[in-house]
Image (tube, helix red, strand yellow):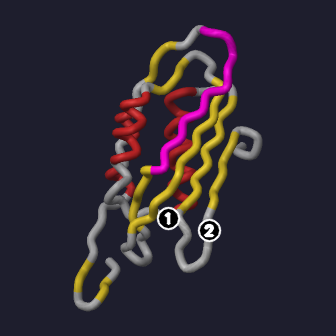
Amino acid sequence: MPVAEGKIFSFEDEKSIKSGFLETIDYSGNPQKIKYETDEFSAVCPFSGLPDIAKVEIDYIPDKKIVELKSLKYYFMSYRNVGIYQEAVTDRIYKDLYNVLSPEYLSVKTVYKVRGGILATCIMDSDTVK
């Protein structure tokens, strides 16, 4: 655990991420691209113990299911006290959404607030994930 001036910051591990919060709704409409965005995502850097704040963008083309938005919000909230690297967040969100939706196409993009002068953006999509 990171230590700063004699104080210990504690955080949870990835087992605390609640992928079971994700609920779906049956979808039978025409193909369409759906986009969800939030700039209220947060997790904890496991190296420094400081918060990582990001904008999350999800684009997908549903097959037979869409994600219920309140469940997505609660799923994101389950990351709040989790120590997880930025790249692992993007990977985990992608895998969890893909597992519940089985979409025709999925893209997850995380854009983190600048830290130390570095802007970090991570992207996973159906075109690059095998």
| Depicted 120 relative to depicted 122: above or below | below
Quadrant for residue 64, please give it.
top right
The image position of residue 55, as x and y in percent, is: 53, 52
The image position of residue 5, as x and y in percent, is: 27, 91
Q: Are the residues tagged 1 and 2 within 8 Å (C-beta)? A: no
Label 1 or label 2, whichever comes before in sequence order: 1
Work out which residue is located at the far right of the displayed protein and give it.
127
The image position of residue 106, as x and y in percent, is: 65, 35
| Depicted 15 relative to depicted 21: above or below | below
Q: Quadrant of the C terminus?
A: top right
Q: Circle 2 sits on which residue?
A: 119
Say which residue appears at 55% left-offset and 69% top-offset: 114
Q: Is residue 106 left or right of residue 47?
A: right
Whether the magenta-drawn stretch holds residue 71 is answered as no
The image position of residue 116, as x and y in percent, is: 55, 79
| Depicted 44 relative to depicted 57: above or below | below
Q: Name the element at disc 2.
A: loop
Amino acid type, mark 2: Leu
Quadrant for residue 43, please give it.
bottom left
Whether the magenta-drawn stretch holds residue 37 is answered as yes
Q: Is residue 6 left or right of residue 101?
A: left
* Badge number at residue 85: 1
Say which residue appears at 39% left-offset and 38% top-offset: 73
Query: Mark 1 packing: few (<14 Cα in 10 Å), some, or many (20+)?
Result: some
Please provide the residue range marked out in magenta. Answer: 29-39
Q: Quadrant of the N terminus?
A: bottom left
Say which residue appears at 57% left-offset and 53% top-offset: 110
